[in-house]
Amino acid sequence: MSKSPFLQLHEADTVVVARDFAPQGSVWTSPDGKLTVTAKERIELGHKMAIVPLPKGTTLLKFGQPIGFSTIDIAPGDWVHSHNLDMMSLHRDFEFGTAIHEPPAPATPRTFMGYRRQDGRAATRNYVAIVSTVNCSATSANYIVDAFDEALLAEFPNIDGVIALNHKSGCSFRYTGPDHQMLARTLGGFARHPNIGAYIILGLGCETGQASFLAEEYDLVTLDNAGSKSNRPLIMNIQDLGGVKKTVQQGIAALKDLLPAANQVQRMPIPISELILGTNCGGSDGSSGVTANPALGVASDLLVAHGGTSALAETTEIYGGEHLLTRRAVSREVGEKLIERIRWWEEYAAKFGAKIDNNPSVGNKKGGLTTIFEKSLGAISKAGTAPLRAVYEYSEPMTEKGFVIMDTPGFDPASVTGLVAGGANIVIFTTGRGSCFGCKPVPSIKVSTNTPIYDRMIDDMDLNAGTILDGEKTVEEVGLEIFEEMIAVASGKKTKSELQGIGDEEFCPWMPGPIF
Amino acid sequence: MSKSPFLQLHEADTVVVARDFAPQGSVWTSPDGKLTVTAKERIELGHKMAIVPLPKGTTLLKFGQPIGFSTIDIAPGDWVHSHNLDMMSLHRDFEFGTAIHEPPAPATPRTFMGYRRQDGRAATRNYVAIVSTVNCSATSANYIVDAFDEALLAEFPNIDGVIALNHKSGCSFRYTGPDHQMLARTLGGFARHPNIGAYIILGLGCETGQASFLAEEYDLVTLDNAGSKSNRPLIMNIQDLGGVKKTVQQGIAALKDLLPAANQVQRMPIPISELILGTNCGGSDGSSGVTANPALGVASDLLVAHGGTSALAETTEIYGGEHLLTRRAVSREVGEKLIERIRWWEEYAAKFGAKIDNNPSVGNKKGGLTTIFEKSLGAISKAGTAPLRAVYEYSEPMTEKGFVIMDTPGFDPASVTGLVAGGANIVIFTTGRGSCFGCKPVPSIKVSTNTPIYDRMIDDMDLNAGTILDGEKTVEEVGLEIFEEMIAVASGKKTKSELQGIGDEEFCPWMPGPIF
Ligand SMILES: [Ca+2]
Ligand SMILES: [Ca+2]
Ligand SMILES: [Ca+2]
Ligand SMILES: [Ca+2]
Ligand SMILES: [Ca+2]
């Protein structure tokens, strides 16, 4: 355990980062003890020091990924910043598949204790849900949920809860237009989610986003535990049933009927290759890209090595790093899908006379971030360094194994809602300023980037990556800690947000518009 | 009480509408008995019959407003539709102030029993609120509200309830950009609403939509009953307080402190000129423009005659009728503000490659709607025929008396949220298909357009305008019924939605984007 003021964020890196003010003469030693580098000048907090000779034109690696080229010869111990590092041609063209690095295969396969649905899907939780088609049915859905208090659910110990998937939309968009499709894809994704053991669909009746459209277009079936796939799910419309009061009575009865079957599940060993990890960060700070994000990347690479899926999202926060991601794409097609999504965002912003600007600000530069790659990689590093196997639109089912991207906004609840709709059955969320996020029906592990926020928000934080800054643990060590916590939580260990019951309000389908 | 199959929607109308299939020879007699007209041919349900001679080129009036010109000479008893009615030049240019009709002054002034706030504002209800700045604080806000159960509130009989104003946004928009301003204006409007006796603002801490920006930009003050206007409202941020658990504990304590003062109110007579009526319709059907909407228009004109305010909204549903509304504008400036808003919607739709199309559909035409004016007037008729005194943007404070327009989408919860933010202290909502809308902290009276939906949704419907279709009451009579119900509800009579506790989920700030 190094007490050096320097951190190596990835074993392939050719620069290290100062986790503290590092006076001239500060020393960094590689984990294997073979390499020792001494700072030739004072290196400020967050800034970089070269650890190997980097002759002019050499690609520099941070997060295990290129952040630019040396513009002059750089020696070990030199400070690295705008005076000797530039993006140069990296930003000029898109390459596809030129930087494929498979994470090493694991020594032993791992399993988690999950639920196996009759149709083969792997679940980490077992919820019962009411899917609201429209804001007009949200209150009725809440009233139905209210009836399922602890006393009633005590009879059904294998059910984690009854949730209402309420939102602020469902009408006044174009029938089968983009918002309609996106909302239906999201609601459909939740309905089909392995963590939902049973559900009903509740609408008003006259909304544009009809329950019947949802059920037919997204091929929804009753997910009863007996595995019968022949039936459409139960659809209830308030206008047909005669108003709120009668709907609530009938809704309670209908859900009660589903509980005994939904309770008939038990956890069993399932390969972690069936975990679909959704990563996110919210309330980022200067430490996010140095501690929690790269550590989560280590966990992500481990999951991918075990055959699992790890999804990066928040397109607006990875913006500027797309040239690096295309180099990791397993095919031109996958890479071009990402570019197409980036273009979509540029055009969307332009519609409103806005711009997506992820360039390092003056403050970022002072903090040691030299290039837009480096800033974007701070977010991208959450999902490790594995080859990019697929790019999905918002809420699309994520069917590929390995590292994938889903296009979502950076707004946390909207981003995670899309990831869960796409099948994520575990979420890991990094935060520097502090977050109290939860996302039913999927557990969300929160990792703090610094120790003060971990201590202050101890009721909400699951893990502390601030130990890296404190010099107590390496990125690798915290990465392993996150990996083990992920398996424990997937197996039933409650996260802090679950212990507090958080995750209903956070259902937040993204709808870019227009609304009429 | 006429059992004629024909209805006159407004006393100035030159056509009547068939409320049922009217065989040739069917008779309509004017209320004063002076005019009797016999149908010269069969008139279908929803279609129009002329009641006076309409020589070629005459303006035809329905809803007391022009719907087009006769293209040939029309005689009393003639069926009026596309073969003899056209919009012609009405649609070609905008006129300003050429059709000003002041409703007649009332015989006696009227009052309602309301609450008078220390600063003079008039309230119809007395709620305590938590204003969430961002989705991230929504769950904590709910947990705080949960502590204020019936038992606790029983000590404070003058408080109607404690509500959480939660939403799905508050971050990932441009700082001081349009979405930020619109959300802040909406949250600020609720915070300042006379029906909110006391409130706190609750945020996460790192959101773009900062609580401090909200409080400063919208000049929020502690609305304690002692009338002290010198203090900023209490702002709580979860990150500062150390997470959900500690925030909830402190939030409960803070709100409890506000209850005794908030309870110190009593109802007193207040002129109805201080009512601000927000009108809306949702789940419209073929009867909406024949029964509930024109009847609500009668009530609206009565309120305006008494010096009160009546606000029309749902711009996309009045689209196509703007040329008629500018003729009612009290100034060119007011009329041009409306046109500017119409252009905004056209450009907004075009950004997404969409169009706002409010033209009568084939089904509308079969149902008897000849022109786009007639269709738009079906919605516009909710707000009567009084001169248009102001046009407001979404959630803007409505300070003018008389008939005004607020630009909102047609989506009901978003539309009413804007109206309430703008100061509406009573809402009347017409529905044909059935609605279970409610909107805390303001009572919302629901009027059905037909008797079957009134009977079927009796737990949700307050009034039945279907009696007009049934031949039991005139539009005028139902209009008076609505007017009296409005005063009774403003004075404390609970609406059906209030009796059921509806109106939390329906808080739905409109945000046209972009979100990042
Ligand atoms: Ca982030
Ligand atoms: Ca984010
Ligand atoms: Ca809610
Ligand atoms: Ca409407
Ligand atoms: Ca509407």
Image (spheres, coloured by chain):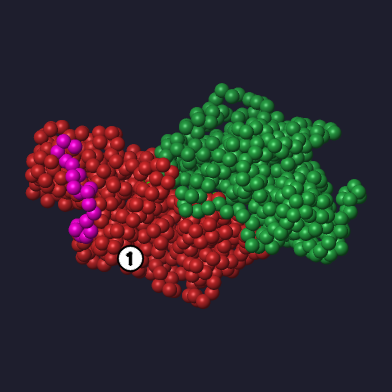
Chain colours: A red, B green
Nearer-the-camera pick, B289 or B71 = B71
Image coordinates for residue A356, horizontal then vertical, percent: 35, 44
Give the vertical position of B35 relative to B451 (above or below): above
Q: Chain of mark 1?
A: A
Queried whether the magenta region covers residue A84, the answer comes back as yes
Question: For this view, does A355 lie left or right of residue A213?
Answer: left
Check mark 1 vs ligand 2: CB closer than 8 Å? yes or no.
no
Q: Quadrant of residue B427?
A: top right
Image coordinates for residue B429, horizontal then vertical, percent: 69, 48
Could you tell me which residue is drawn at 42 percent across and 46 percent down?
A351
Queried whether the magenta region covers residue B229, the answer comes back as no
Say whether residue A299 is visible: no
Image coordinates for residue B486, horizontal then vertical, percent: 75, 42
Could you tell me which residue is drawn at 27 percent across and 49 percent down?
A321
Could you tell me which residue is drawn at 13 percent across and 43 percent down?
A70
Dominant secondary structure, magenta: loop
- Secondary structure under tag 1 reads loop
Q: Which residues are magenta?
A: A82-100
Say whether residue A134 is visible: yes
- Amino acid carrying mark 1 in the image: Glu
Give the vertical position of A319 relative to A191 (above or below): above
Q: Which residue is mark 1?
A: A400
Q: Report crowding for label 1: few under 14, some 14 to 19, many 20 or more residues within 10 A (C-alpha).
A: some
Could you tell me which residue is drawn at 32 percent across and 59 percent down?
A337
Nearer-the-camera pick, A261 or A195 = A195
Give the vertical position of A498 relative to B452 (above or below): above
Q: Quadrant of residue B329?
A: top right
Name the outermost residue toward the right.
B33
Image coordinates for residue B134, horizontal then vertical, percent: 48, 42
